[in-house]
Each structure stands twice: as C-alpha cells, then as structure tokens.
Amino acid sequence: MKQFIIVSLTVLVLLLTALNFGIYNMAATDKHWAPTEKLISWVRDSSINARAKEIEIPVLDEDVMLEEGFKQYHAMCTECHLAPGKQPTAQAIGLYPQAPLFYERASVTDEGEKSFFSKRYFWVVKNGIKMTGMPAWGPTHNDETIWAITAFLQKLHGMTAAQYSALVDTHGDDLMHDHHHDGDHPH
C-alpha cells in the first residue's frame, strides 16, 4: 500500500510539473487528447443529465411560443449554431468544441426522447456550459423565453434551408427589431 501511494504521488507530481511547463496546449485550434475529450464529454453529459432530469416541461407546441423561440434563436444563436442554408461564420469556425448544428439532427418523434432533449436544451440555454463558448441566457432571459427557444430547437431538428428561409421571410423586419431582453433584468 505504501509503495502504491509513493508511485501515485510521484506520477501526480510529474503530471503537475509537465502541465506547469505548458505541455497541454489550451489553444482552441488544438484538439483535446482523445482521453481528455472522452472525460470532458462524460463529465458534461453527466452534469447536464443530473441537473435536467427533474425539470418540469410546459406545453411547447403553441404557435406564439414557437414564433418567439424562432426570433430569439435567429437573433442570438445563429452566429455559432448556424441555421439551415447559412454558411459558417468566423465565430462558428473558431469555436472548439464546435457548437452543435441542431438542424442536422434527425427529427424526434418518441415522446421520451423529446422530453430528454427538451430538459437538456432548457438547462443548457439557461445555464450555459463552461469553456465552450455557450453563454448562460438565464441571467438575461426568463424561463418562458428559454422554453420558447427550447421549443424551437426541437422544431429545428431536420429543418431545411427552404423551411428556415420561409420563417425569415414571414417575420421580415421583425427579426431586426423584435429581439428583446426581459424587462426585469439589466441589459
């Protein structure tokens, strides 16, 4: 047992010394080591799942909610998550890890899966994710607005460029002037 502790402490000291000398490149242009990537993904998914599982989901299919979610998504999310038919932006290209492209995901019909995604989306939009570029919108947007974004993210699964373009055409100038923050939060 004593030998195990000595070996463990030696490995820890060597690892910390190597990290102190900059062996691990933190640049967004350099991918994580495979074990680091797996560890980060596992910790992130476990954390989100643990915190999202008890969230109560409101009705998400109301037209007004979907319209509001679309407007919010178009104003706040397309720089990183893009939209169907939109070319990658400089910001999206420079992110590591890359932001998920929700329109590339298959449409979900199973209610259990929809619930799983809705809870996760709501939690992530509200709280953000450390060291990914995903901000927390909870400090500036109320839960109703975040649920609207969540509802739209579900509709975005499998959406085509023509479908997204039709939404943009329908809302036209509103998209440039209708993005708002909640009145009870500072800007």
Image: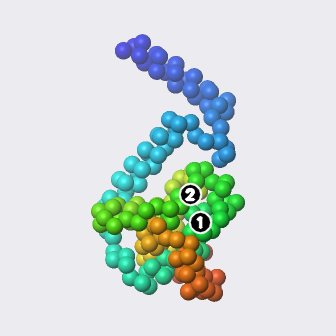
Relative vertical location of residue 87 with respect to residue 11 in this rendering, above or below:
below
Q: What residue type is labelled 1?
A: Leu
Most extreme residue toward the top is 3
Q: Which amino acid does label 2 sit on?
A: Ala
Q: In which quarter of the image is the C terminus?
A: bottom right
Marks 2/1: CA–CA distance: 9 Å
Q: Position of residue 87 (x, y in %)?
A: 65, 65
Relative vertical location of residue 1 with respect to residue 175 in this rendering, above or below:
above
Labelled pair 2, 1 in contact (Cβ < 8 Å): yes
User: Residue 87 or 121: which is nearer the viewer?
Assistant: 87
Q: Mark 2 points at which residue?
A: 99
- In this rendering, would 72 be left or right of 59? right
Count of numbered marks: 2
Q: Position of residue 133 (x, y in %)?
A: 59, 57
- In this rendering, would 87 be left or right of 111? right
Q: Quadrant of the N terminus?
A: top left
Mark 2 element type: loop
- In this rendering, would 45 be left or right of 88? left
Circle 1 Cα neighbour tier, 10 Å, few/some/many (<14 / 14–19 / ≥20): many
Relative vertical location of residue 130 with respect to residue 114 in this rendering, above or below:
above
Q: Name the residue under label 1.
A: 82
Residue that appears at 47% across and 40% down: 39
Residue that appears at 41% across and 66% down: 107
Residue that appears at 52% across and 71% down: 160
Most extreme residue toward the right is 90
Q: Position of residue 58 (x, y in %)?
A: 33, 74
User: Residue 34 or 134: which is nearer the viewer?
Assistant: 34
User: Residue 1 or 100: which is nearer the viewer?
Assistant: 100
Q: Where is residue 10 in the image (x, y as percent from the top left)?
A: 52, 19
The answer to whether any part of residue 20 appears in the image is no
Mark 1 element type: loop
